[in-house]
Amino acid sequence: MTLMIIQLLIVLLALYVGSRYGSLALGAISGIGLAILVLGFGLQPGKPPTDVIYIIIAAVTCAGILQASGGMDWLIQIAERLLRKHPNYITILAPLCTFFLTVLVGTGHVVYTLMPIICDISLKKGIRPERPCGVASVASQVGITCSPIAAAVVSFVIISNANGFNINNLQVIAITIPACLCGLMAAALVSYRRGLDLDKDPAFQARLKDPQMKEYMYGNTASVLDKEVSKEAKRAVFIFLGALAVIVFFSITQIAGHDIRPKFPTGKVIDGVAQMKPLAMNIIIQIVMIAAAAFMVIFCKAAPKKAVSGAVWQSGMVAVVAIYGIAWLADTYFANYMDVMQGGLKDIVQHYPWVIAFAFFAVSVLINSQGAVVVAMLPLAYSLGIEGPVLLGVLPSVYGYFFIPNYPSDIATVNFDRSGTTVIGKYLLNHSFMRPGLVSVIVSTIVGTILVRIFY
């Protein structure tokens, strides 16, 4: 038992140190922990999450090509028109815009262009920018468990199917989208009158008295409405949406009992009949995404070199390395001590299976990746005997990295807010994302649990 605890501390230390450096270091430093466990302690290495990694590469390549084509700019323009048309409701509409952008493209990093616009609209309208900015940043990450092509959703499907819970991407987001929307609207409501109004905020008024600071805050207008969107960019958006529609169509036919997926021999013969197995949805997603990326390159003048240098592709590849290292490290540790953990935790999870949500949340605080949390923790949850519907209900709890405000979208949001109201507090945890983040995750998890009780 002492050795098991020491090795657990090594795993946690690797995750903690990696989170301090961030980016690629998170996955790379997990490799140090893996080397110590395998080469130093002689633990049998687990399996790297190759299926999930392939999905991420395919989806990120497609989204990166979409960004290179200019299609992202068109989506951002549509969102900006909505926000500028209804500025009084920006605290409600801003998180909806960032949420659905993430749902569409599978990554929260697409909102960097929209966030300065949210700050600008709220500031010019006299609304405290912290109110929409804090919840909008949270919403951009909440959307990950609601996107059919996001790593977290695809990972949940792959691992669940392997553990006897047959479910597809569409069935997952049919639970997570309404659950997370309820959570986000609750977070928007608690943010609606949050903090002092700008005309009553002494810190803001002090900044306003400085002519240079006033010019900095009000002198420029953040907007993409003046950017010309080519017909090729719009065509790329339609290709991307068409790819999503194809994926959803395969899922719908599967749910309806008219599975149209190609079938291939499994190599097994029962009573003289060769057994056939339909093509896995993760393979279909990869094929459709890669094909869509190719169509955008051929028909939409999307430059691959521009895609590689874009924020979406780069952040996606960072996620690949992070998930690769983190999930491999976690699987190595858990696989070697599965029997011990089952014996110690089985009674607890049998009576209170929802407590796994706290474990999901805590791990997410450390590793800053919802996909990595699912890949690392879901096999353990299934091995403990927790049923698939329960895990689906608590899936929103894999988002916890707002807790320590070191994630790029949160840091960027603080920098985008020229009013200085969106902040990381003196004591680190008293920051602008804590309240909307906690409300969103708690409400989403409760609603998700209720929904699976109704439908499963």
Image (cartoon, rainbow, N blue to C red):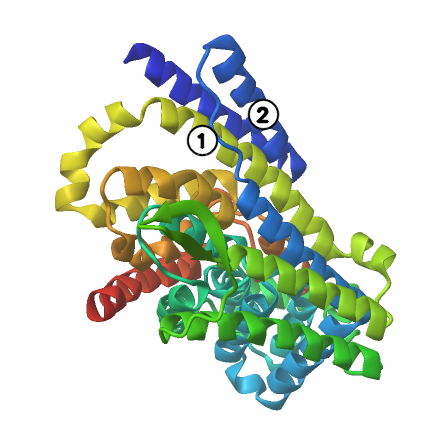
Name which residue lies at 76% across and 80% down: 235
Residue annotated with mark 1? 330
Q: Quadrant of the C terminus?
A: bottom left
- Viewer-side residue, 453 vs 406: 453
Q: Quadrant of residue 62?
A: bottom right
Q: Secondary structure at mark 1?
A: helix
Q: Amino acid at mark 1?
A: Ala
Is 39 positioned to the left or the right of 75 in the image?
left
Residue 299 position (above or below residue 294): below
Circle 2 packing at 10 Å, graded few (<14), some (14-19), many (20+), is: many
Residue 441 image offset from top left, x and y in percent? 37, 58
Q: Quadrant of residue 83?
A: bottom right
The one of 142 and 293 positioned closer to us in this rendering: 293
**Image height of 14 relative to 256, above or below:** above
Q: Are marks 2 and 1 in contact (CB under 8 Å)?
A: no
Please give left or right for residue 267 compared with residue 208 in the image. Answer: left
Q: Which residue is mark 2?
A: 31
Type of residue at label 2?
Gly
For the N terminus, the image quarter is top left
Q: Position of residue 310 (x, y in %)?
A: 78, 57
Residue 125: assigned label: none
Q: Is 52 on the left or on the right of 382, as rendered?
A: right
Which is nearer the N-term, disc 2 or disc 1? Answer: 2
Q: Is residue 100 visible?
A: yes
- Residue at the image position 58 percent from the left and 70 percent from the top: 104
User: Relative to residue 9, is residue 205 depicted above or below?
Assistant: below
